[in-house]
Image: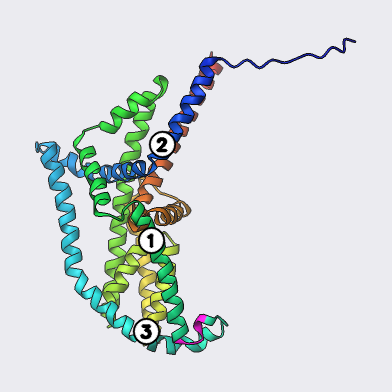
Amino acid sequence: MDNTNQQKILEISWVTILRVVTALAVLYFLFLIKDLLVWFLFALIISVLFNPAINFLQRKHIPRTLAAMVVYLGIFSLLGIFLWRLAPILLSELKEFSMRLPEYFEDVSPYLKGLRIAAFESFQSFSQAIESLLFRSSANIFTALGTFFGSVFSAITIFAIAFFLSLEEKGVERTIYLLAPHDYKEKALAVWRNTQKKITWWFGVRVLGVLFVGLLTGITCFALNVKYAAFFGILAGISDFIVTFGPLFTGGIIAILIALSSLPKAFIFVIAFTFIQQIEGHVLLPVLTKKFLRLPPALVLMAILIGGKLWGVLGAILAIPLMGMLFEFIKGLLEKKDHHQASQISSETSS
């Protein structure tokens, strides 16, 4: 037996080394401009959500530049008017709620003391705990906002990028066509168009669901002569973005606050709120999303938590369609790949 040691030589070509170095350099460059990439991604989401309205106006023979200006200015004007009209009512309710908070605490303190938590021993300790929590939270929030959305310049930059992306018709499609491998160009474009359509409709349907739940919750509280009806309605609407978990948590909090003044009203509210959720979940959303995207609730919750942690409130909202777009795009590519492999297997079998 030949006991001579055999040496295995690993040869790496200069081309391979150059590719590795180039890939590392690109990754490092992307890391350096990660903040700008986040801005661009959010701007892309905004432009995707606004493009259907712009395309509709363009089909009516309105120049795309003018159509984009009308859509962007119109949406922000409506949002500004809504906030301007609602702000006085909301601030008044919040002021009254903060003044009556000690009374509410005294009503529930016997039950809270049973939890043996130091913050629930007295209202003073409770307020100090809340103040400390808010201070830490605000510090974290303002740190994140200062990094991404804290300045007016950052917000203007994001919406300016979104506006210019909307001006460029089919700009994303051309980019995908240039970057995608030759054999996957048409598949990637088809998946992108389908993803764009689904995520736009999904987000629009979710907004309608939020408005539906928020409006009916506010009307229910107003009909029951419950204080802070506007605040409760807005809270219920915003939390409706988090499927299942959001309404369950918010409905419970509102019911507890109503029960402090009237148990019968709280019981009626629970029935009405459950009925509202059933209508939304089993009538409104299934009809509107029958042919469109349905994101898993866990994915929506994860997107909100990640977006809110990194980029504040705006990040929490925009992270939902961003996560949905990535989810649908990857799913579409995998489905196309499976379909292509199945076609190859069937053709080989038939031959």
Marked residue nearer the N-terminal end (2 or 3): 2
Residue 338 relative to residue 200: left or right = right
Neighbor class of circle 1 (other Cα within 10 Å; few <14, some 14-19, many 20+) is many
Residue 290 versus residue 196: which sits nearer the camera?
196
Q: Secondary structure at mark 3?
A: helix
User: Label 3: which residue?
Assistant: 101
Most common SS among magenta residues? helix
- Image spot of residue 72 (x, y percent): 17, 48
User: In the image, what residue type sits under mark 2?
Assistant: Leu
User: In the image, what residue type sits under mark 1?
Assistant: Ile
Marked residue nearer the N-terminal end (1 or 3): 3
User: Label 1: which residue?
Assistant: 141
- Image spot of residue 338 (x, y percent): 50, 30
Rendered residue at 25%/32% (across/down): 170
Numbered range of the magenta stretch: 119-123
Residue 84 versus residue 197: which sits nearer the camera?
84
In the picture, residue 248 is in which quadrant? bottom left
Q: Secondary structure at mark 1?
A: helix
- Image spot of residue 236 (x, y percent): 34, 68
Whether tag 2 and tag 1 are in contact, CB under 8 A, the answer is no
User: In the image, what residue type sits under mark 3?
Assistant: Leu
- Tell me the distance, in whole angstroms, between the alpha carbons under discs 2 and 3: 48 Å
- Image spot of residue 213 (x, y percent): 31, 65
Marked residue nearer the N-terminal end (2 or 1): 2
- Tell me the distance, in whole angstroms, between the alpha carbons under discs 1 and 3: 25 Å
User: Label 2: which residue?
Assistant: 30
Whether tag 2 and tag 3 are in contact, CB under 8 A, the answer is no
Residue 81 relative to residue 212: left or right = left
Rendered residue at 30%/68% (across/down): 234
